[in-house]
Image (spheres, rainbow, N blue to C red):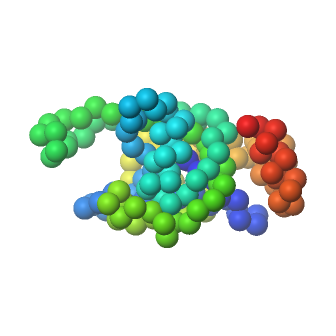
Amino acid sequence: MLLVPVGDHILVPLITVPGSEVVGLPKGRLEPGEGPTQAAVREMREEAGLTGMVLEPLGTISYHFWARAEQGRVNKSVDFFLMLYRAGSPARYRPDEVDHVRLVPLAEAEALITHAGEKAIIRAAGRRVRDLSRNGFLAVRDAGARERLIAAVA
């Protein structure tokens, strides 16, 4: 899950799944040779047009769904990570991946997300953002100071 600090607000990207009205967080499958953090960064770029730096894990959700391509039920487990925005624009998402991307305030995201598991990830992100803000990490307004903080975490 990517955090986009804008002034005093934290925005998160939400996607609309193709062919449905399901609203959720960017996510996907691991590609060969790829670890969960690399997949999270790649999927964020593909589905939301944004790149970010992974800060820490937020949690894992598991679920199942019917997939036409597989002609059956698919069991899926997804690791979510707290990420800090680095570059990009939601206007650069891949339309073959998602129908729509929008940035919404973190405080409003839970009400917009369709599935309970992802709502729990949003709540976990909100708790971590409060912790990071208390420590001054997300409150830094000076771009140079923010870059030094990011380098210290990386």
Q: Hey, which quadrant is residue 58 in on the image?
A: top right
**Looking at the image, residue 76 lies above or below residue 46:** above
Q: Position of residue 4 (x, y in %)?
A: 65, 58
Q: Hey, which quadrant is residue 65 in on the image?
A: top left
Q: Position of residue 112 (x, y in %)?
A: 46, 60
**Looking at the image, residue 54 lies above or below residue 52:** above
Q: Hey, which quadrant is residue 18 in on the image?
A: bottom left
Judging depth in this view, the residue of 68 and 41 nearest the camera is 41
Q: Is residue 18 left or right of residue 39?
A: left
Judging depth in this view, the residue of 61 and 47 nearest the camera is 47
- Residue projecting furthest to the front: 33
**Looking at the image, residue 85 lies above or below residue 32:** below
Q: Is residue 30 visible?
A: yes
Judging depth in this view, the residue of 49 and 130 nearest the camera is 49
Tally of numbered discs: 0
Residue at 49 percent across and 30 percent down: it is 35
Q: Is residue 77 visible?
A: no
Q: Is residue 68 left or right of residue 55?
A: left
Judging depth in this view, the residue of 30 and 109 nearest the camera is 30
Q: Position of residue 79 (x, y in %)?
A: 48, 34
